[in-house]
Image (spheres, rainbow, N blue to C red):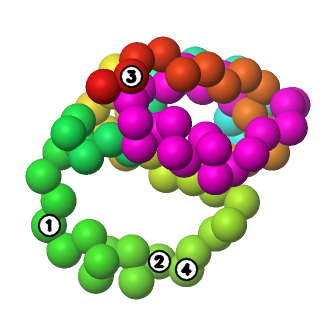
Amino acid sequence: MIVIDKDDVVEQLKNGVCRIVFTKTNGEDRLMFATLNEEILPPQQDVEEYIQKKKPNPNVLVVWDTDIGAWRSFRWDSVKEFETEIKL
């Protein structure tokens, strides 16, 4: 586990695609290339309505997995590596 600045990570994800290695809840390590960049994200419909239905969890971040083309999440405390890969 590494110490990361959550605001910095979110900012980097908004600027491009990042490489994240984290430990899944089943104990396996997972490599994911992820983004929050609006130019890459799929078109959204009723996002605010969907978000408001879910109870926010400050320990988890939801990101777009660019390899599988789907929304995925990770726990902040499970991150082992984080690198900015591609700046747009």
Reading the image, the residue beneath label 4 is: 55
Q: Position of residue 59 (x, y in %)?
A: 72, 60
Q: Position of residue 18 (x, y in %)?
A: 50, 25
Q: Are marks 2 and 4 in contact (CB under 8 Å)?
A: yes
Q: Of 5 and 70, which appears nearest the observer?
A: 5
Q: CA distance from mark 4 to mark 3?
A: 31 Å
Q: Are marks 3 and 1 in contact (CB under 8 Å)?
A: no
State which region is magenta. 1-23
Reading the image, the residue beneath label 3 is: 87
Q: Nearer the viewer, mark 3 or mark 2?
A: 3
Reading the image, the residue beneath label 1 is: 45
Q: Nearer the viewer, mark 2 or mark 1?
A: 1
Q: For residue 16, what is the image quadrant?
A: top left
**What is the secondary structure assignment of the residue under circle 2?**
loop
Number of numbered discs on residues: 4
Q: Position of residue 37 (x, y in %)?
A: 32, 41
Q: Is residue 30 visible?
A: no
Reading the image, the residue beneath label 2 is: 54
Q: Residues within 10 Å of mark 3 (few under 14, many from 20)?
A: few
Earlier sequence position, callout 2 versus callout 1: 1
Q: Position of residue 21 (x, y in %)?
A: 66, 23
